[in-house]
Amino acid sequence: MDEFTLREELLKGEDSTRQFKRQIDTQDRLAAEIVAFLNTRGGRIFVGVEDDGTISGIAPEDQGRNLENLISNTCSDSVNPPCGVLTFNLNTKDGMVMVIEVPDGAEQVYQDARKVIWQKKGADKRKVTSVSELKRMFRETHIEYADQQGVPGTTVDDLNLNLLKPYYSEKSRSGPLSDDEEERERQLRGLYLMKGERLTLTAVLLFGKSPSLVLPDFVTKLVWFKGTEITGNEYRDSRRLEGTLQDQYEQAMLFFKRWNSKIQSGDSFNSSGTFEIPMFVFEEILVNAYIHRDYYKPGSVRIHVFDDRIEIISPGSLPNSLTSEDALKGLGTERNHRLAYFAYDLMNYKSARSGLLRAAKAVPGIQLQNNIEQEEVTVTIPL
């Protein structure tokens, strides 16, 4: 990083990846900042910079080994488990700036010397105190993927074999699904459709007899509002889409096909019409909402239709260090590997990560908002 790049970064202001510090006051305060970054995808601390992004420079007495030793001691003594950071100094015409690069601590949950767990909240940080949030953090750091977890109260009897058998026969190289119970359960465990004696989340969502009874949170709620505000009292349609993910997907697509107004594509009154929004745009965004949502977070996929836009909202913020810009460019990681594996055949999911990119090219103005505080992702399609 040179001075020009540094000043470009500072012009962007503080957010969940950048923190400005005039100086480092105490080891405890530095530890809290580092822990917050470690637990929230990493970031940079710029020392010698005012809150407004102007460079004030590091005081001469803090330059050199004094500051380096403070950072080293903080990482080894005041962060648990100990971590490593990178530091480098930049001399500018306004003074020296030290940049502390904190990595993404995705494989651990970090706390400071007082056993406080911090996370970034925009430009600030917050204490993590919710039991459910702590559980989710620990699950994620131990790579316990939600779609591979057993669903309490389920057994192999909750499977809809009429759905599973044709799929298994077509895809398996070892023959059809066995009629022998023990052998069939072994086959299901091999596909991560069973864990112990329970069906996995993937099995219930894709091949369950009554997914919405077992997992009532994981449905789709669709509301077609009158006007442009969610606070309006009137709506044109309201539906709760239930069943397997394939069922919910097909019901949502049927709604969009009926809703999608047609415009004349030619000069003749009798010329064939074209959809205002290409149907593949809805396909790509819906499949992403179902496959990449955070299944550790209770809640429904929500579809809000307004006069000027459509919003498709999925629970959970973007994983790891992924940004809204990255997602729209087709970059990213799969959060639910087994769901993605089956969805390739069941829900038109191509796993090429180009769906949102193609949708954004087809409909200029599509936006993706990663709301970290509310833990949800909203894709907005303008009309």
Image: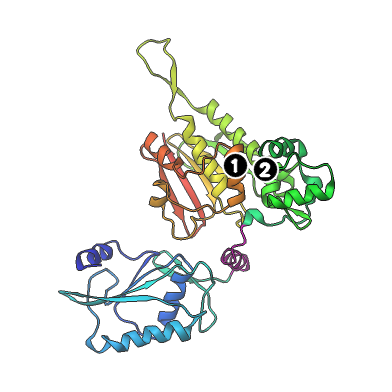
Residue 134 is covered by the magenta coloring: yes
Whole-angstrom CA distance, mark 2 to mark 1, is 9 Å
Q: Residue furthest front?
A: 174
In the drawing, does residue 342 fall left or right of residue 108? right
- Residue that numbered label 2 is attached to: 206
Q: Secondary structure at mark 1?
A: helix
Q: Looking at the image, tell me whether mark 2 or mark 1 is earlier in sequence order.
A: 2
Label 2 neighbourhood size at 10 Å, few (<14), some (14-19), many (20+)?
many
Residue range in magenta is: 130-145
- Residue that numbered label 1 is attached to: 343
In the drawing, does residue 49 fall left or right of residue 329? left
Three-letter residue code for mark 1? Ala
* Looking at the image, residue 285 lies above or below residue 48: above
* Looking at the image, residue 270 lies above or below residue 58: above
| Type of secondary structure dominating the magenta stretch | helix
**Quadrant in the picture for residue 133:** bottom right
In the drawing, does residue 80 fall left or right of residue 144? left
**Residue occupying image coordinates x 46% and y 71%:** 38
Residue 22 in picture, x, y percent from top left:
29, 78
Q: Secondary structure at mark 2?
A: helix
* Quarter placement of the N terminus: bottom left
Three-letter residue code for mark 2? Leu
**Residue occupying image coordinates x 46% and y 40%:** 355
Residue 193 in picture, x, y percent from top left:
70, 50
**Residue occupying image coordinates x 43% and y 27%:** 276
Frontmost residue, 135 versus 200: 200
